[in-house]
Image (cartoon, rainbow, N blue to C red):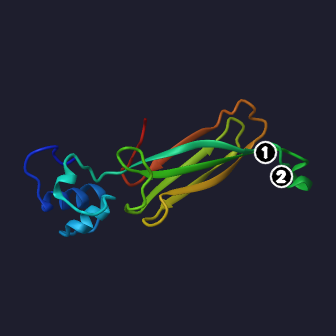
Amino acid sequence: MALPSSGPLSIGDIRNEQVNNGGFASSYSLRQLSSNAGKSTPDAISEFYGYSAGFLYKYDGLTLVSSTTPFCEAVMKNRVLTIRRFTIYIVDNSCNPITSHPNYTFTVSITSNNSGGRNENITINNGSSSNYTTYVAIDACDTNNQETVTITNSDGLTQCSL
């Protein structure tokens, strides 16, 4: 739940928002609270009007990387796979990627109509990275690009939509 957009606002209110909705460690330091929120100095309580510590996620879909590379020719008899890149991001409430966030875990299942694809567990850790990228091989017989992406998020995040 976001902080109010006007009226009384305290460091305790900001701390509670970050601990309860953002998964941050408890702190009553305005500098630490501002840092958690991605705000730079000088720090002010007024910067937190309307602030929400909750995070979202978004993903870039399945981006074509290669559709012509034979995979393991001797075994697969020159079978051609479509290789796609998939990236999931942790973002703020404006859908901008961020780096300061709790660790989040997702299960991503990517399948095609012709049984290519995979399941992958993804953990995005707090720190310098706010995204995770993986590569997926889809059976080249799926010429209609009918891949399906299913994301299961075990940490309560919702998908960002613009």
Q: Is residue 127 left or right of residue 140?
A: left
* Residue 134: % across, % down: 62, 55
Residue at 42%, 56% in the rendered image: 98
Q: What residue would you read off at disc 2?
A: 71
Q: Are marks 1 and 2 in contact (CB under 8 Å)?
A: yes
Image quadrant in which the C terminus is located: top left
* Residue 112: % across, % down: 67, 38
Count numbered badges in the picture: 2
Task: Look at label 1 and name its amino acid.
Answer: Leu
Looking at marks 1 and 2 on the same chain, the residue that comes earlier in the sequence is marked by 2
Residue at 19%, 62% in the rendered image: 15
| Crowd band around label 2 with a 10 angstrom C-alpha radius: few (<14), some (14–19), many (20+) | some
* Residue 50: % across, % down: 21, 46
Q: What residue would you read off at disc 1?
A: 81
* Residue 157: % across, % down: 38, 49
Q: Secondary structure at mark 1?
A: strand
Judging depth in this view, the residue of 53 and 147 nearest the camera is 53
Judging depth in this view, the residue of 157 and 98 nearest the camera is 98
Q: CA distance from mark 1 to mark 2?
A: 7 Å
Residue at 31%, 62% in the rendered image: 36
Judging depth in this view, the residue of 121 and 100 nearest the camera is 100
Is residue 149 shown above or below 47? above
Task: Look at label 2 and name its amino acid.
Answer: Phe
The disc placed on residue 132 is none
